[in-house]
Image (spheres, helix red, strand yellow):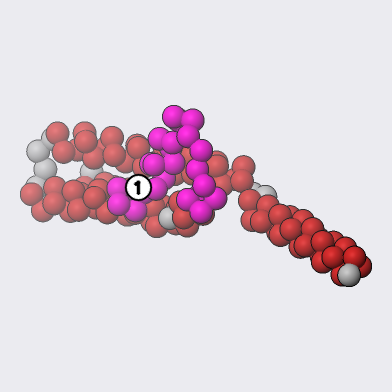
Amino acid sequence: MKNIKYCFLTLLISTLLVNCSVVKKPFAYKGKEIEYAESLFKRQNQVTQQVMILLEDEIALDDEEMVSDAELKMHDACHLLNDIANRERNGEEMSLYYQRQAHSSFIGCDQAVKAMETILKEIE
């Protein structure tokens, strides 16, 4: 009976150690992810500033609606990125689940920022 408990305990500890090492591997590129997120955040802020300046000028109503719609889509796509930035600035910790969720939204955010950049180039 002691032998079975010992084997079970050894198996349990081995499994936990393996699982811990497997969980860390997806985050091995954390530095690159951070750089990408910071770059994306900066691009989004630059585009938002350009939109604010553009909307101060008088532009065609169709262009204004197109810019406003694209800006709303961009903010919706990038809301997790913005939330992460605010939490980082405030020193708040985030769960692993939330980090994964936010990371999975980066591609959509990037696409929305690119779409907004394209629209701004067309209008200028």
Q: In the image, what residue occupies the spot 14% across and 34% down? A: 56
Residue 54 in which image quadrant: top left
- The span picked out in magenta is 74-99
Is most of the magenta stretch helix, strand or loop? Answer: helix
- Looking at the image, residue 31 lies above or below residue 70: above
In the rendered image, the quadrant that contains the N terminus is bottom right
Given residues 56 and 36, the one toward you in this image is 36
Disc 1: CA contacts within 10 A as few (<14), some (14-19) or many (>=20): some
**Is residue 71 visible to us here?**
yes
Please indicate whether residue 116 sits to the left or right of residue 36 in the image.
left
Q: Amino acid at mark 1?
A: His
- At numbered mark 1, what does the secondary structure look like: helix, strand or loop? helix
Residue 36 seen in render: no
Q: Residue furthest top?
A: 90
- Provide residue 110's location: percent of width, then percent of height: 41, 52
| Residue 101 image point, x, y percent | 46, 55
